Image: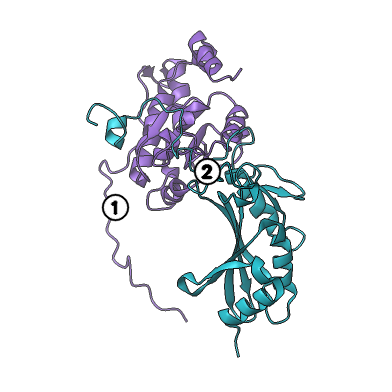
Chain colours: A cyan, B purple
Amino acid sequence: MSLTNEQIQTKLIEKFGEQVSNFSEPYGMLTFEAPKELNLKVLQFLYDDETLKFRFLTDLQAVHYPNDKARPNDPVGWGRELAVVYHLHNLVDNVRIRFKVFTDINTPDVFTATQLYATANWMERETYDFFGVNFVGHPNLKRILNVDEMDYFPLRKEYPLEDQTRIDKDDEMFGRGGSIN
Amino acid sequence: MSRPVQFNINSKPVDYNGHISIVGAPEGSGGEGFFATKLSEVVGLARKNSIWPLPFATSCCGIEFMATMGSHYDLSRFGSERVAFTPRQCDLLMVMGTIAKKMGPVLKQVYLQMAEPRWVIAVGACASSGGIFDTYSVLQGIDQVIPVDVYVPGCPPRPEAILDGFMKVQELVGQESLRRRNSEHYKALLESYGIQ
């Protein structure tokens, strides 16, 4: 009898109660979220449990939701602008799940998963490089793919894709400003 | 016991009649056992027909270069029989492919290690101008870090186009003045790139 999404969901709720929330199944892949303080506990539980056995970290990245800014009257815990997404895989039963933690963009501190998964090392460096998520406890958190001197986090939505040093691009042809617009 | 040969059984006499091309002699006056010409012509002739390229192949244009080096579009018939990956012994730096901003200083270092006279050919759109990748991480043309002699456009350029660019480099090499590398103009060019 193979592992189903309902079984995973019941096991998570019986262990963590109300703290795991937002269960959904886009394209059949169970997705849930938890507060960022619990991310290591949830990952450890998914790793250790003998029926769940999610022992392979497929991917770790972040998503920037610029419309979910924390409002000034709400407590800091509300901030949901930056999401760190973990994709885990159970190699024995061939089941994948997605686990999200949300964090405020002004204090993007998330505990590092490098103690549990060695692959998280470079993946977290990449997430830091492009989104600025500060992984607390990471052994070597510095830029990995971009130039070391870069002072901004390129994949955040406020920054444009194009290289800003070009002076010869014809804005009209690219639909930006120019005399036709 | 081997099968009998089925080709070239009745061989025809080969008629070359101008189908072989030999490098022409430079202008000069000659006679019985001597030939007088300018030194720069002879040196240019020797250099242009024995260019040893350094393929700095990064991405897709590198694959087209591999096709150019193959037997169909043979690059070695132009004299570049020995393609080495060491800058110390090569004349021509062929930059083929997308160069990221992180790779820029590495490319400059490779260029600095080459001995004069050295030429640079930028193969493909990405090396010439950043190509289709106008992003925060791609160098918008290698001429931001090193001086380039010939640009070969294309994405990727066909092997014939790469050979055409190579032949233009040959023209440049053949007609280069022997004093060019010590001239003020050249020194100013290198200064503008920050190369001493």
For disc 1, the neighbor class at 10 Å (few under 14, some 14 to 19, many from 20) is few
Q: Residue at x 45, y 23 (%)?
A: B44
Question: What amino acid does circle 1 point to?
Answer: Val
Up the image or down, A18 lies above or below B187; here it is below
User: Is B46 left, or right, of A111 in this rendering?
Assistant: left
Front position in the image: A9 or B170: A9
User: Is A91 left, or right, of B181 in this rendering?
Assistant: right
Question: What amino acid does circle 2 point to?
Answer: Arg
Q: Residue at x 66, y 74 (%)?
A: A12
Total labels: the figure holds 2
Residue A80 visible: yes
Q: CA distance from mark 2 to mark 1?
A: 69 Å
Image quadrant assignment for residue A42: bottom right
Q: Position of residue A87 (x, y in %)?
A: 59, 65
The residue tagged 2 is: A156
Q: Indicate the secondary structure of the residue bearing disc 1.
A: loop
Up the image or down, A7 lies above or below B146; here it is below
The residue tagged 1 is: B14
Question: Which residue occupies the extreme front position in the image?
Answer: A73
Q: Nearer the viewer, mark 2 or mark 1?
A: 2
